[in-house]
Image (cartoon, coloured by chain):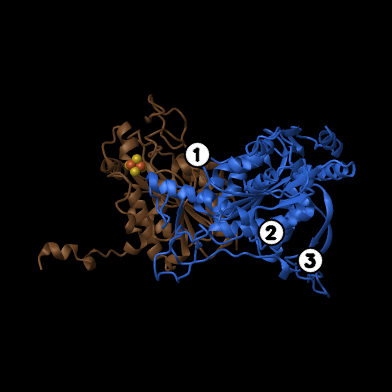
Amino acid sequence: MSATEQIIHPAATVHPIDNLLRADRFPHILCPGCGIGTVIHGYAHAIAASGLSEDRHVCVSGIGCSGRAAGYVNVDSYHSTHGRALPFALGIAVHKPELNVTVISGDGDLTAIGGNHLIHAARRNVNLNVICINNFNYGMTGGQVGPTTPVGAKGSTAPRGAVEQPFNLPYLAKATGAAFVARWTVLHVREFQDAVLRAMNKNGFSFIEVLAPCPTSFGRANNIGDGLHEVEIYRERCVIENGAQNLEELDIDLIDASKPITVGNFVDIDRKPFIE
Amino acid sequence: MAVSVINKGTKPEPEPRVRTGGHFMLGDHACAEGALAAGLDFFGGYPITPSTEIAEHIAVRLPLIGGRFVQMEDELASIAAIIGASAAGARSFTATSGPGFSLMMENIGLAAMMELPVVIADVMRASPSTGLPTMVGQSDVLQARWGSHGDYGIIAYCPSSPQECFDLTIRAFNAADQYRVPVFILMDEVVGHMAERVIIPAAEDIPHTPRKGPRHKPGEEIFLSYAPDADMVPPIAHAGEGYKVHMTGLTHDERGYPALNAPTHNKLVNRLVDKIRLNAADIVMYEEIATEDADTIVISFGCTARSARHAVAEARREGLKCGFLRLITIWPFPEKRIRELIDQGNVKRFIVPEVNLGQIRREVERMTSLPVLRLNHAGGEMPAPKDILELIRS
Ligand code: SF4
């Protein structure tokens, strides 16, 4: 047997999370260098590490590139409407509290059109794990600015640069009552995975912001050449500060190279869950 | 030492799911009791006049019988939550009125596309916009049929009395599960806020149509959430049952996976429409009085049908050949029956009184070249029997 044949032998292609991905849907739609795949990968690893049968995990997404995440994980998965992943997930989590429900969606989906649901799900402390993929823009529709776009960053609907103050998502999540709040990037693969696992083990509302490159839309408009370039920015400027208290000061400014990007597991408190 | 004296002595009776017996009840409360009797598991709603009594009544009763009541942050959330609960297997329900119904429209399309059964009571008030919040309207009937973008099938019942609010709500849950569609109970402010006698049967006499489940165990083979049976309705598997379903509002194949091409789309959307259209004979309900020899037929629904019934009875006493067709299902529209009545040959005209500017009249006009007389009010009050009688005499 030649070496080539050995490589393509099915047994040699089995990966520990193969059964957690819908490989029958590959090739996926994501662009080269996109950070969303790394997030899906981290979620799948957290499922494997959770000790819970995959039948007890459910994934819900909204709309957008990040909203396609639900379509690639091999658990009961629902690709809902734009902004409504959280109330959709609430219905599942409240009717079947034994299920571990994770919402994976984008910054625009969860914090613009779905922003009202985010603050109310956090306030209620519904047992949901929210993974908010923040790529600073609307990727799927071609790079429009949104509520996370840094001031000055360009988008197709802000050709002279965004002028609005963006959300500081961990601060928002903490202020509205989330029991677990973290911010990581797709560079921090292990830390992100660990945060997702902690969210899964928490009976309450968990919010994880994960920064991810969108080279096709945000990167191209803002002179961030490719996915790797943005990950290099993360490596140069990220500072890990678990338990950081001053969340109100931890805005992200991807454009200003002098500013650090603070990441970490910021909040982990016990609050009365929505369903005990 | 603090000693609790609550419940000392006799134990309270356990809360019954079905309140068997005779009651004097509001239409809104009868609708709520119908939902509870039908096996309601999850209610997600937002207060809005004149439907709020439904939510309030369920908030009292549902938690005591093991269900969940959540007051959501808005109607967008309410409809999304009940669809999610349905995906997890719940019989789920919300109640609203025009403005809230408008907000729900996008996700009503999602429920139709994902084929997740939900029941929505819309207690109609005078519209458009905020309109007359506490006063009657019947102007959401076309919105109920066409309100979300695209083509899809739905079912809508239109009760005329508190008793029917109870009975049709049970029917709505069964139809939603049988056909995997959103089902509407199109009440109106008059019927919702009217108190009348309501008879609730014994629990074992409440009809129950379960959802069709998978016919194999999880893992034995791939479960196809969208492979229809001969009735065009596919079996359903829920979150947590082990079938690893995927559901999306995108155009999808039988597995539930996105399939973004025109032939798949055409096939899917046609089935969503046909599963109601071609099963209409089993779904459509109407009441008919004295139509055999009628030259004038009054077609009506909801509160207006109460006036119409009086007017037709009075006209008959006067010797006028007048009949009455009351629509119990508005959607699917009883086209077949109306065509049969026309084919009888004796009908010379129809009269359609309604509290809107002619939404159902338009449906009738679509089917006949006979005159269709109108009796409309934009909302705030309903036609009196004498108004309808005058038109019959004309
Ligand atoms: S447009 Fe951006 S977010 Fe969407 S797949 Fe491409 S790189 Fe990823």
Marker count (numbered)? 3
Crowdedness near tag 3: few (<14), some (14–19) or many (≥20) residues, C-alpha within 10 Å: few
Question: Does B294 sit above or below residue B181?
Answer: above
Q: Specify which label sits upstream in the sequence, 2 or 3.
A: 3
Q: Nearer the viewer, residue A142 or A215?
A: A142
**Residue lying furthest front:** B345
Seen from this angle, which residue lies furthest top?
A160
Chain ID for label 2? B
Mark 1 lies on residue: A112
Is label 2 in a helix, a strand or a loop?
Answer: helix
What chain is tagged by disc 3?
B
User: Which chain did the renderer colour brown?
Assistant: A
Mark 2 to mark 3: distance in Å? 14 Å
Q: Amino acid at mark 3?
A: Thr
In the picture, the quarter occupied by the N terminus of chain B is bottom right
Instruction: Name the disc covering residue B20, or none.
Output: 3
- Position of residue B126 in the picture relative to residue A131 (left or right): right
Q: Does residue B196 sit above or below B369 in this rendering? A: below
Queried on whether the Cβ of the residue with tag 2 lies below 8 angstroms from ligand 1, the answer reads no
Queried on whether the Cβ of the residue with tag 1 lies below 8 angstroms from ligand 1, the answer reads: no
| Picture quarter with the C terminus of chain B | top right
Q: Quadrant of residue B104?
A: top right
Q: Tell me the amino acid under the disc marked 1.
A: Ala
Q: Residue furthest right?
A: B318
**Relative image position of residue B178 (x, y in whole percent):** 58, 60
* Chain for colour blue: B
Decide if residue B64 is on the left or right side of residue B232. right
| Mark 3 to mark 1 CA distance (whole Å) | 48 Å
